[in-house]
Amino acid sequence: MSLNTPTVDDITLEALDVFENTLVALKTCNRDHEKKFGSNQGGKIGDQLRVRKPAQFTVRSGQNWNGQNVDEQYDTLVINYQKGIDFSMSSMERKLDLNSMSRQILKPAIVRLANEVDMDVLRVGTQAIAQAVGTPGATPSALSTYLAAGKLLTNQTCPRGKGMRHLMLDADAEAGAIDFLKGLFENGNSLSKQYDSAEMGYAVGMHWNVDQNVYTHTVGTYAGTSLTNGAGQSGATLITDGWTSGAVTLNKGDVFTIADVYDVNPVSKATLKNLKQFVVTAQISDTTGDMIIPISPAIVGPGSPFQNVNALPANDKTITLLGATGTVSPQNVVWHKDAVTVAIVGLDKPEGVNNAAVKYDEQSGLGLRYIEWYDGDTDLWKSRFDVVYGILPQRPEWGVRIAG
């Protein structure tokens, strides 16, 4: 069957449908900003967009006016991912009809591409999240683990209600959860769905999804008695010592706490019961037992509208990493859709190319580009799919890892 332009359109539309139905994590993210990219209204913005964060304030006590500047903060959403699938068919293979091509080539290619995008979303989003529950290396086996995750979100003023909080689990965690949550607070239809399709649906304040692309984290290697090195530290780095020299490499995504440094409610600034959790933002190794660790969130002490700890850390306070050294752990994750922002940007159809199509679904916001051309030297029809996107962990405090 000759693949003329209408058939190329058919291929791209079918690919877009497979692509959309294969994604899981992407559907739980904020997509509000992607239409601003590539728009001609007011001039194109390029590949970066500033995304503002909500302003925060301190509260005056008493009658006298005490003005404060409105310190607006923002993150930058960058379109820096381009992923694709490339393949070729001989003239003989090109004789296949569209149904055979879909089954043998198209669907496997697009499923692979969609899984790659899904993995990127989960990896980038999860690595930025500092809040974590569970024990790395052990599949959660009790409802209390998920309730603890929900409590952390609530303490960070994360909105709650049906459709607000999305949970992504690997297959092991989902299988265990279906068993110990079976029938809990569920009506007959929901309970039937658990048994018929092995899906939890909505339970304990979260919409449950199984996703084979859950990010797997390897805890860094470490030894010694790690301590803060200097009192009153603030900002996005932490000076430490006490590590065993030459035996430590912390990985991006490692989570730790500091003794006596507690979390606070982001609005009232009231001290919470749990120690503040921090995440390592880049891999780092020790130098003679000392390390300056890049961390998130940045430590902000009392007196600032952005205060996030009850007090700045004192000197020689113990640093405790989550998980035993070298532990490999699936990072099941629950987040609000505003925790992670994703933008998929539709590419233009190349000029002068007949066998090309760009398809964009207005409802889902997803777009794919497909191009094919003939190479007479090899008698091959060459094809490529492309998708371009950016990922921004905009409000990681509205996410919690659930170690597996």
Image: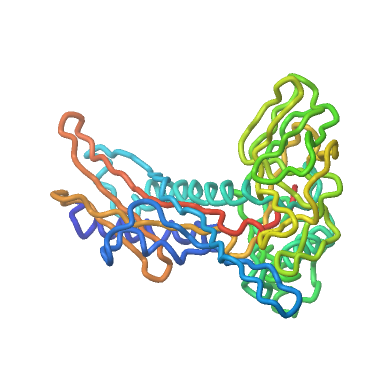
Going 63% across and 56% down the picture, which residue do you hit?
A: 396
Going 82% across and 32% down the picture, which residue do you hit?
A: 226
Looking at the picture, the colour scheme in use is rainbow
Q: Quadrant of residue 159?
A: bottom right
- Residue lying farthest to the left in this orientation: 352
Q: What percent of the width, then of the height, locates residue 248?
A: 74, 26
Is residue 178 something one can see in this rendering?
no
In the displayed structure, would residue 9 be above or below residue 219?
Answer: below
| Left or right: 15, with 203 as reference point | left
Q: Quadrant of residue 280?
A: top right
Foreground residue among 333 and 89: 333
Going 69% across and 36% down the picture, which residue do you hit?
A: 218
Q: What percent of the width, then of the height, locates residue 228?
A: 79, 36
In the displayed structure, would residue 68 be above or below residue 340?
Answer: below
Is residue 269 something one can see in this rendering?
yes
Going 47% across and 46% down the picture, which residue do you hit?
A: 112
